[in-house]
Image (cartoon, coloured by chain):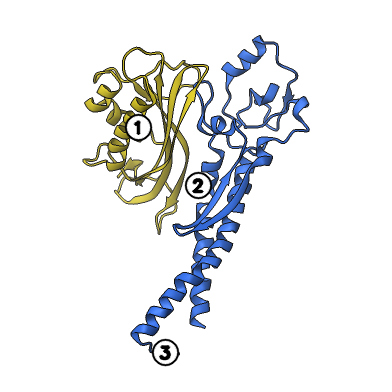
Chain colours: A blue, B yellow
Amino acid sequence: MTVILSREELQAKIKNLQTNLIPHLVEKMGEAAKIVEGQAKKNCTLGKSPYEDMVFPTKFEMYQLEGKIRGIRMTQRPSVFVAYEGAYSGAPYSIDENRRREMHMRDTIYSIVDSDQAGVHGLVGTPVDYSVWVHEGTSKMWARPFITDAIFEKEKAIRKLLSEAVLEDLEEQAA
Amino acid sequence: MNATILAGILLALNNDSTLMSLMGKTVGDNPCYRAQRLSAIIPPVITLRADPEDSELYCGTDYAVSTPLTGAVLARNSTTAQLDIWVSSAQETVPNTGFDTDAIADRVDILLLYNTPARVANTHGWRKVSSSQQYEDDTGLWHNALRYSFWYLIKQGYGLT
């Protein structure tokens, strides 16, 4: 059905669109952030991490010299060995037995949604202090950007979710 | 990443006299190179590493690479490259501070993000994904990690366009 609006009515409609879009965006951004959080955790999971083949033999030799190798076990890929603190495998994962009860970095990855005047922001991160070194790399260890890669991996899904938020708002306004 | 593209990025960086000057080098020293797993870092250098890349087929195309050579565009590859700038604070001459490292990063931005004239041939759509700076207490190294994403097209017959 065609509706003819006056200029003031059209302005009010557009303003309503912008105002009512925010709760939809917050809801969908929350879902998108959860998806990225899940992928980031997957990137840190032994057997599923895309960084498993990034072997750091210099670190392995360093730990071997310091007598810190506690055990070696095979992973799903026989060519990759997991030793002290996952030093040999590229996956950012620790198998130190003493730390089994402590929370691993992967378990601390979280997501939140923040809404302010600048817009709606989805944030995924971890409070662990060494995570920045894992993510950005050091002179002895290649970067394993488990969060950035998760965002890229799920970019299409994120765009689809945010588009749905806009569509829902438009349908509400049209009704 | 396509080998020609990777070489093109390194060439664009190594041939820029302003960047070389900021790094305390001259054109021909080639301090920008592909990251090597076992070799030690002797700063100031810029190492390049390719991150995961994906490819989208163009409409009506069945394969990302095919022959014979007819010039049709087959696919668009989207890749992410990480450039790491390493500067030692123990060095007596510049660059040796985080400020110097930032200046090098700014110049890399100009070379890659503007890409006009086309410094890295056959690429387009450059955008910066992230940047960060860390200081390693044990090695005394300033480390700027820059990530860029861009596209390049695959032409029938394995060529780039």
- Is the residue at mark 1 from the same chain as the one at mark 3? no
Q: Secondary structure at mark 1?
A: helix
The residues bearing labels 1 and 3 have C-alpha atoms spaced at a distance of: 55 Å
> Which comes sooner in the sequence, label 3 or label 2?
3
Q: Which residue is mark 3?
A: A2
Q: In the rendered view, does A127 fall on the left or right side of B73?
A: right
**In this view, B96 is above or below A41:** above
Visible in this render: residue B7?
Answer: no
Q: On the rendered structure, is B120 left or right of B138?
A: left
In this view, the residue farthest toward the top is: A65
Residue type, numbered disc 3: Thr
Number of the label disc, if any, that sits on residue A42: none
Amino acid bearing label 2: Phe
A107 over B46 or under it: above or below: below
Asked if labels 1 and 2 touch by Cβ distance under 8 angstroms, the answer is no
Above or below residue B45? Residue B70 is below
Same-chain check, marks 2 and 1: no
Kindly identify which residue carries mark 2: A152
Name the residue carrying label 1: B105
Residue B5 position within the rendered picture, expressed as x and y whole percent measured from the top left: 34, 35
Circle 2 packing at 10 Å, graded few (<14), some (14-19), many (20+), is some
Depth order, front residue of B69/A1: A1
In this rendering, position of residue B104 left or right of residue A147:
left
Going by the numbered disc 1, the residue's amino acid type is: Ala
What subunit carries mark 2? Answer: A
